[in-house]
Amino acid sequence: MEVTYDKDNKERVPFEHYFAEYQNADPQEISARTGILYNSGDGYFQVKFLGEEYRVGFPDFTIAPAVSDTGSNDSHYFPLMEISAARTLVIRFLLEGCKAESTGKFLTYREVPWGEVYYRQFNGRCMMRLAYSYGNRLDAFRQSMETLGAQAIKAGDAGYEIEVFDGYFIRFQLWGGDEEFPPSSQILFSDNFAAAFHAEDLVVACDVIISAMKAV
C-alpha cells in the first residue's frame, strides 16, 4: 500500500513502522482490546471512523468502504480513503488503543495527559486553523460538520459534536469574529480519549477532521 506523508509528520513515527507491527499483530487480541469486530473468514476489521464504516484488511491494511444498505456510497465522503494522517491514526488505534467508556465529561486539550507539552502545536494546527478557516463563515462550518454526520450542540456561536471512533467524541465550538475581536474556537474531548490515545494523536484527529471539513 502506497502512503504519502505530510511535511509536518516529522515528530510521528512513519506509517511503515506501524504497518510492520500491524502485520505481526494478533487480530483477535486487537478485536478484544478495542471492541472492533474482526471478520476472520474474510480477514478484515469493521471500523467506524468519522461516521463511515470501513473494512480494514488484515494483515495487508487494505481499506474499503463497507457496502451501504442501498449498495451505493456515491453521496458519502470517506476521509480514511483520502487523508494519509487518518490511516496513521486508525492503525495506531488498532495497535495501541482500547475500548473505554466515557463518564460524559469533556476535557480541554490542556486537561489530557501531556496536553500542556503539545499545546502550542495543538493550538496552531487545530484551534487557530479552525477559528480562521470558519470563524467568519459559520454557515460553511455548519454545512461541513453536518455533511460529516456531526450533531449540533449549544455552544459558542456554532458548535458540533462528532464521533471519531465508536464512543469517542470531539466537540468543535466557534465564536465568529467582528471588527473588534478576531474569531476564536474551543475543542473538547470526551474523557475516555485519555485512556486510549496519546496527546499527539488528538492533534492528528482534529487536523484530520478539519481537513475532511474542507474537502466535503
Image (cartoon, rainbow, N blue to C red):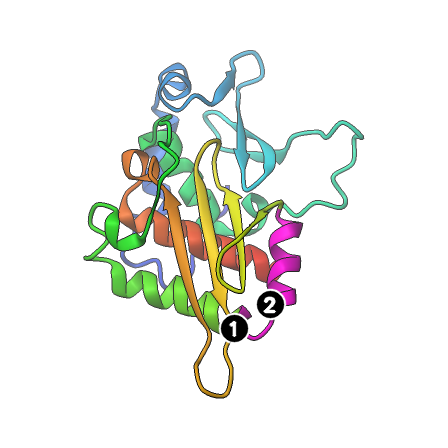
Query: Dot 2, crowdedness within 10 Å: few (<14), some or many (≥20)?
Result: some
Query: Dot 1, crowdedness within 10 Å: few (<14), some or many (≥20)?
Result: some
Instruction: Name the amino acid type tagged 1.
Output: Gly
Nearer the N terminus, badge 2 or badge 1? 2
Q: Main secondary structure of the magenta part?
A: helix
Q: Position of residue 126 (x, y in %)?
A: 40, 62
Indicate left or right for 64 with 187 as reference: right
| SS assignment at label 1 | loop
Residue holding disc 2 = 138
> Is residue 136 shown in magenta?
yes
Q: Which residues are magenta?
A: 134-148
Instruction: Name the amino acid type tagged 2.
Output: Leu
Cβ atoms at labels 2 and 1 below 8 Å apart: yes
Q: Quadrant of residue 181?
A: bottom left
Tell which of 102 and 86 is nearer to you. 102
Q: Position of residue 189 (x, y in %)?
A: 38, 46
Q: Quadrant of residue 137?
A: bottom right
The answer to whether residue 19 shows anywhere in this view is no
The answer to whether residue 127 shows anywhere in this view is yes
Residue holding disc 1 = 176
Q: CA distance from mark 2 to mark 1?
A: 7 Å
Count numbered badges in the picture.
Answer: 2
| SS assignment at label 2 | helix
Indicate left or right for 157 with 185 as reference: right
What residue appears at the point 25 percent right and 46 percent down from the top-left corner? 112
Residue furthest to the bottom: 179
Tell which of 209 and 10 is nearer to you. 209
